[in-house]
Amino acid sequence: MSVEEGRKAPDFTAATDGGKKLKLSDLRGKPVVLYFYPKDDTPGCTTEACGFRDSAPDFKKLKAQVIGVSKDSVARHDKFKAKYELNFPLVSDEDGKICEKYGTWIEKSLYGRKYMGIDRATFLIDKAGVVRKIWHKVKVAGHVDEVQAALKAL
């Protein structure tokens, strides 16, 4: 399944860091930045997470909730969040069902070797639960600024 701009974001309920549960539809009424990343505590993923962390005051002014999603376990998310003092929830999608719903579980290639992995992607969801902007194959540099600009334009 793949998500399209202008359509409702697929709902999900999943475990987050700290042993909590998050249901996407419970966040209706405020914009949501849902970003998918390959793995906790790797260079690109850490840079991206810290970018969202450092921009938290700007997202708060826009009344937006940032949520990170990867296939890492809740325990791994807890360590990653504590190490970098991340100030937003990290969803554990160990079974890959959320990635499947959002079309971010894709075939990748590294040095000619093909494997399955998470497409670094971000979905901007408006307060009514409709996907307004999608970024696939995200390049980390400047991405947080792009997301903020799109959020301001909502």
Image: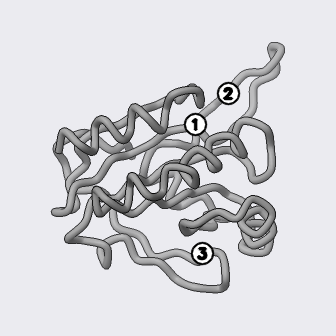
With 50 as the anchor, is 29 left or right in this view?
left
Q: Is residue 8 above or below residue 74?
A: above
Where's residue 70, x and y in %? Answer: 63, 55
First in sequence, mark 1 or 3: give its number.
Answer: 3
Label 3 to label 2, Cα distance in Å?
A: 26 Å
User: At numbered mark 1, what does the secondary structure look like: helix, strand or loop?
Assistant: loop
**Residue under label 1:** 119
User: At numbered mark 3, what does the secondary structure look like: helix, strand or loop?
Assistant: loop
How many neighbours does mark 2 have within 10 angstroms: few (below 14), some (14-19), or many (20 or more)?
Answer: few
**Which numbered mark, 1 or 3, is in the foreground of this view?**
3
With 107 as the anchor, is 75 left or right in this view?
right
**Which numbered mark, 3 or 2, is in the foreground of this view?**
3
With 132 as the anchor, is 137 left or right in this view?
right
First in sequence, mark 2 or 1: give its number.
Answer: 2
Closer to the camera in the image, 89 or 115:
89
For residue 16, the mark is 3
- Residue at 70% from the left image edge and 64% from the top image edge: 85
Where's residue 133, x and y in %? Answer: 29, 38
Quadrant occupied by the C terminus: top left
Label 1 to label 3, Cα distance in Å?
A: 20 Å
Q: Is residue 108 above or below residue 15?
A: above
**Residue under label 2:** 108
Where's residue 36, x and y in %? Answer: 55, 48
Quarter occupied by residue 145 = top left
**Which numbered mark, 2 or 1, is in the foreground of this view?**
1
- Residue at 39% from the left image edge and 63% from the top image edge: 65
Residue flagged by tag 3: what amino acid is it? Thr
Residue flagged by tag 1: what amino acid is it? Asp
